Image (cartoon, rainbow, N blue to C red):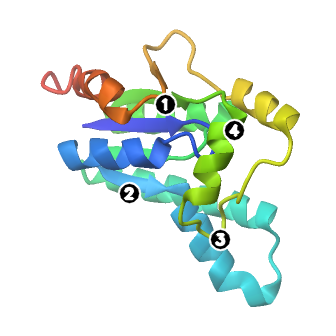
Amino acid sequence: MFFLQMAGFPGSGKSTLAHSVAKRTGAVIVDHDVVKSALLESLEAQGVNPQTAGKISYGIDWSLIDFHLSLGHSVIFDSPCLYAEMLGKGMRLAEKYNANYKYVECYLNDFQIINERLKKRKRKISQIPEVLSEKVFSVAVDSSERPLNIEHVVVDSSKAMEVYLDEVMEYVLKNEIEK
C-alpha cells in the first residue's frame, strides 16, 4: 500500500499523471479540485469565499485519505502541495497506516505552456482559468514544497507523459512487494 502525494502548479499535468498511475495500480484518487468545486457549488448561495472553501475542502481531503488508507487502499492525493504542513500530514498518515510515502512533482516552468493548458482544459469551478502574472507564476512554481531526506521524483511535465510514466511507476511501486 502506498500514499502518493502529487505536487505541481495548476495545469502542470498532476491530474493526468494521477489518473494514469491509478489505472495501473488501482489506487484511489482524492482530487482537491473535485472536493473544493463540490463545496463551492453547494455553498454558492451562502456566499462562502474560495479561501474558506479551500481550507474546509483540505479538511475533507485529509479525512478521505485517512479513511481510504484505513481500508488498506493505496491513495493518490492530487493537489498543488504548496505548504510544508501538507507534507507533514501526508507523511504522518502514511506512517499511521504503514503505507509507503511517495511524492511526485510535475514541474513545468513555462508560463506560456501553462496558460495554454489552463485555457484549453474543461475547468472546474475551483480551478484558475489562466495565470495573469508571470512573476506570480515563477514564485509559485519555485515555492512548491518537497520532502527533505526522502526519495521523491520531479518530472519535466513539458514533455509527453510517456517519457516519464515508467520512471514514476517504478518509483511508486518500489518497496510495494515488501509490505
Q: Which residue is mark 2?
A: 67
Q: Tell me the amino acid under the disc marked 1.
A: Ser
- Mark 1 or mark 3, which is nearer the start of the sequence? 3
Judge by depth and name the residue closer to the eye, 98 or 171.
171
Comes first in the chain, label 3 or label 4: 4
**Label 4 environment density (alpha carbons within 10 Å; few <14, some 14–19, many ≥20):** few
Please state the horizontal and vertical placement of residue 93, each as a whole percent of the image: 45, 39
Q: Are marks 3 and 2 in contact (CB under 8 Å)?
A: no
Question: Which quadrant would the N terminus be assigned to in this image?
Answer: top left
Left/right of residue 87 with respect to residue 174 in the rendered view: right
Q: What is the three-letter code of the residue carrying label 4?
A: Gln
- The mark that comes first in sequence, 1 or 2, is 2
| N-term-proximal mark, 4 vs 2 | 2
The image position of residue 21, as x and y in percent, is 29, 41
Give the number of the mark in front: 3 or 4. 4
Three-letter amino acid code of the residue under disc 2: Phe
